[in-house]
Image (tube, rainbow, N blue to C red):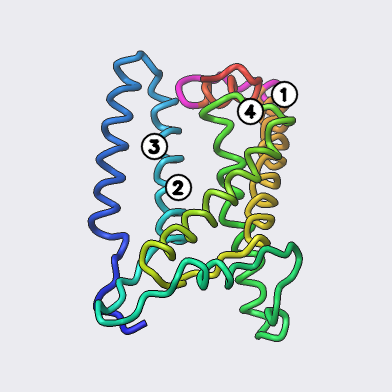
Amino acid sequence: MNLLKLIEFVPLPFLIGIGFLVLFLATLWRKGRRMAYLFCVSVFWLYLMLVVAVTLFPIPLPDGLEARQSAAHILSRVNWTPLYFGGLFSLHPNVILRELAGNIVLTIPLGFGVNFLARCRARHMPFLAAGVGLVIETAQLLVSLGIGGRYRGVDINDVLLNAAGVLIGYGLFRLFAWMYRALTVRLGILNRGLQAYIYAVAHNEGW
């Protein structure tokens, strides 16, 4: 594309995200949510904003004189075949590592942190994991269709890698919860404030 401009995440989308966070926190505060919960919501929200910034921005705006690509053409370039990576493994190892590990690492904090906001059962995590990857790739596809050009690769393998990251994050949370419970009992730690909330979450009693 011949680009006239790029829509960057900073400042406008970032400020909109912060504005929604403030409104959300005010609503939770009026409902009597404890400060520790509001802190966890804030950290998780900022993380989600980072995910949006990394996966969607910058968004290119094509030259108005340039012919838009059809939806059929854009959809034809989507990889719907699981475990088919095209020519990825012919690239530099750093590129391969960034493409594969990057998609996993991106969603590990989600699998870990969501447990501080809602009660997450192990049997529900595969559905959440798959949903996260689908949301990210669908958002990229919708932006591509909206601007009339493919600006990010939309790939079913990214869905699988994002899902793996969520499941790894949840596994790390379970390990963390077990260790935190054991250490607080063994060391006789008095839990107060944020520590008390983390202790309750580790016992599946928070929120």
Nearer-the-camera pick, 203 or 32 = 32
The image shows residue 102, relative to residue 106, as above or below, that is below
The three-letter code of the residue at mark 2 reads Tyr
Q: What distance separates the C-alpha of mark 3 from that of mark 4? A: 19 Å
Q: What distance separates the C-alpha of mark 4 from that of mark 1? A: 26 Å
Q: Residue at x 26, y 46 (%)?
A: 16
Residue 84 percent coordinates (x, y): 74, 70
Q: Residue at x 69, y 44 (%)?
A: 167
Q: Which quarter of the image is occupied by the N terminus?
A: bottom left
First to last magenta residue range: 185-194
The three-letter code of the residue at mark 3 reads Ser
Q: Main secondary structure of the magenta part?
A: loop
Residue indicated by mark 2: 47
Q: Helix or strand or loop: what does disc 3 sit on?
A: helix
Q: What distance separates the C-alpha of mark 3 from that of mark 1? A: 31 Å
Q: Is residue 67 left or right of residue 129?
A: left
Number of marks in picture: 4
Say which of marks 4 and 1 sits in front: 4
The image shows residue 154, relative to residue 29, as above or below, that is below
* Residue 186 numbered tag: 1
Query: Is the Cβ of the residue at disc 4 closer than 8 Å to that at disc 1?
Result: no
Residue indicated by mark 4: 120
Q: Residue at x 71, y 39 (%)?
A: 126
Residue indicated by mark 3: 42
- Tell which circle, 3 or 4, labels the residue nearer the N-terminal end: 3
Asked which quadrant contains residue 185, the reply is: top right
Nearer-the-camera pick, 171 or 59 = 59
The three-letter code of the residue at mark 4 reads Cys
Q: Helix or strand or loop: what does disc 2 sit on?
A: helix
